[in-house]
Image (spheres, rainbow, N blue to C red):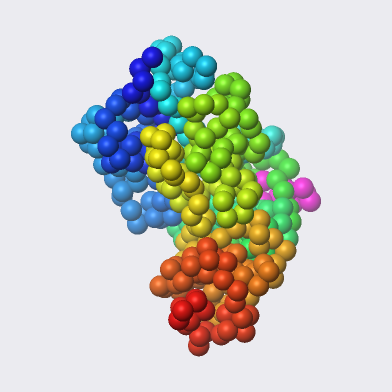
């Protein structure tokens, strides 16, 4: 066995970050990153934000500069996939038919868009959204404006894509199963804030509603028929109803699965020398004592670092406060914390939703467990400290914009 070969199955942010961390931590052995796509590892947030909106060039999307892999002696296999792994033999098989041995294996296969079996899904003008090529295609479809776009899905990606489509001058209708968009994630009051924002910019909602059929003319999408029978004109239909972890490799290898690959806080799987990170990993979080699977870029970034250090035998755990952000029209939102702990809690609002600049806090047992910032600056540090420190807070002071957040921390 090649005892100095770390193999990374998956070419996303987690895999690329793991490779970079291995080298920065002094690992001198062989590193192979196997990417199913023909693209070098790239960031996903710009795909539905800056790149899609034409505010960022293609060369800003890759995780690492094009020459980094060669300069750091990292073998990058593009258009190749790990099709099977044998943890007992420490071998993997690739789609090309090659067999490789490894000393440590990191599974960072990410997730795939959830597909719904709609009649008409195979028509031209119907697409899901996940990859760099998806973003390129959607940008081309939207850029000239004047099209009827139906967005199926009222989650974060669906709302971001709706904002982009509207911003390019298209007519946008959004379908979702919730009565209020995003309410499952942030509650009806704050979900209502985002709905009003979109409606102000001309986005129309059909909630709750689902697509029953996509009608077409000449092989091209022409309309979406909803479950109520309403016919919505549609030149372009984007299905954005979430993703599912890509666990096929892990399942075939006999790893423990539950909403992804079950790993401990150091991202070790149930099999020795096999680790998992990113969207596919359901990791034990020391803060909550529960397993969490996160589909956000910060989890992939930090998970890649932790997995790399753990594979080198270091004492590394994934214990940071979860984080994500969204940009929609003129609103920039950041979120920190634990949705499982904030579930059912009514948020404490600092400021007013009407002004479009505010903070929201979710509490459990008198301490902040999650927070959201809308068009606010320089709040990340005190918010993360409040959450990670489990610091009891006075609700009145928490809601008062006149009280600096720093003053809610002990010793201030």
Q: Quadrant of the C terminus?
A: bottom left
Is 232 covered by the magenta stretch? yes
**Percent coordinates x, y for residue 281 in the rendering:** 55, 39
**Percent coordinates x, y for residue 302 in the rendering:** 43, 48
Q: Is residue 335 in sight in this rendering?
A: no
Q: Is residue 411 above or below residue 33?
A: below
Q: Is residue 222 in sight in this rendering?
A: yes
Which one is in front, 109 or 305? Answer: 305
Which one is in front, 220 or 287? Answer: 287
Q: Residue at x 24, y 37 (%)?
A: 68
Q: Is residue 220 above or below residue 253?
A: below
Dividing the picture into quadrants, the one containing residue 254 is: top right
Which one is in front, 394 or 149? Answer: 394
Q: Residue at x 68, y 53 (%)?
A: 176
Dividing the picture into quadrants, the one containing residue 73 is: top left
Q: Quadrant of the N terminus?
A: top left
Residue range (magenta): 224-233
Q: Residue at x 45, y 27 (%)?
A: 105
In the displayed orientation, state which residue is furthest to the left: 71
Q: Is 371 situated left or right of 215 in this image?
A: left
Q: Residue at x 69, y 60 (%)?
A: 343
Which one is in front, 235 or 281? Answer: 281
**Percent coordinates x, y for residue 150 in the rendering:** 60, 50
Is 75 covered by the magenta stretch? no
> Which secondary structure dominates the residues rendered in magenta?
strand
């Amino acid at each position: 066995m090649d005892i100095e070969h770390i193999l990374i199955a998956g070419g996303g942010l987690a895999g690329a970050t793991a490779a970079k961390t291995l080298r920065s931590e002094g690992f001198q052995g062989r590193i192979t990153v196997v990417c199913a796509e023909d693209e070098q590892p790239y960031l996903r947030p710009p795909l539905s934000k800056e790149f899609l909106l034409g505010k960022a060039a293609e060369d800003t999307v890759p995780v690492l500069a094009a020459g980094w892999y060669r300069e750091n002696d990292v073998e990058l296999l593009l258009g190749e996939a790990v099709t099977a792994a044998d943890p007992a033999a420490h071998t993997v098989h690739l789609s090309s038919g090659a067999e490789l041995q490894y000393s440590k294996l990191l599974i960072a296969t990410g997730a795939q868009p959830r597909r719904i079996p709609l009649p008409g899904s195979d028509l031209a003008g119907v697409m899901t959204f996940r990859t760099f090529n998806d973003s390129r295609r959607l940008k081309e479809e939207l850029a000239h404006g004047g099209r009827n776009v139906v967005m199926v899905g009222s989650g974060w990606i669906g709302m971001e894509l709706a904002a982009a489509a509207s911003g390019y001058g298209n007519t946008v209708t959004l379908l979702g199963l919730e009565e209020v968009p995003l309410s499952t994630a942030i509650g009806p009051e704050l979900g209502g804030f985002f709905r009003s924002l979109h409606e102000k910019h001309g986005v129309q909602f059909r909630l709750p509603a689902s697509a029953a059929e996509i009608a077409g003319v000449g092989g091209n999408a022409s309309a979406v028929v909803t479950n109520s029978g309403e016919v919505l004109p549609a030149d372009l239909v984007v299905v954005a109803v979430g993703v599912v972890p890509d666990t096929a490799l892990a399942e075939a290898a006999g790893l423990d699965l539950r909403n992804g690959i079950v790993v401990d806080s150091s991202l070790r799987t149930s099999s020795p020398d096999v680790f998992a990170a990113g969207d596919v990993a359901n990791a034990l979080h020391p803060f909550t004592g529960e397993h969490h699977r996160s589909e956000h870029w910060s989890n992939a970034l930090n998970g890649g670092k932790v997995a790399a250090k753990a594979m080198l035998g270091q004492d590394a755990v994934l214990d940071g406060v979860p984080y994500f952000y969204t940009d929609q029209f003129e609103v920039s939102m950041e979120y920190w914390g634990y949705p499982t702990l904030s579930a059912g809690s009514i948020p404490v609002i600092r400021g007013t939703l009407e002004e479009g600049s505010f903070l929201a806090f979710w509490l459990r047992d008198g301490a902040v467990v999650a927070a959201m910032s809308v068009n606010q600056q320089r709040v990340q540090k005190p918010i993360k400290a409040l959450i990670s420190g489990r610091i009891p807070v006075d609700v009145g002071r928490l809601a008062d914009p006149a009280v600096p957040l720093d003053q809610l921390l002990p010793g201030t």
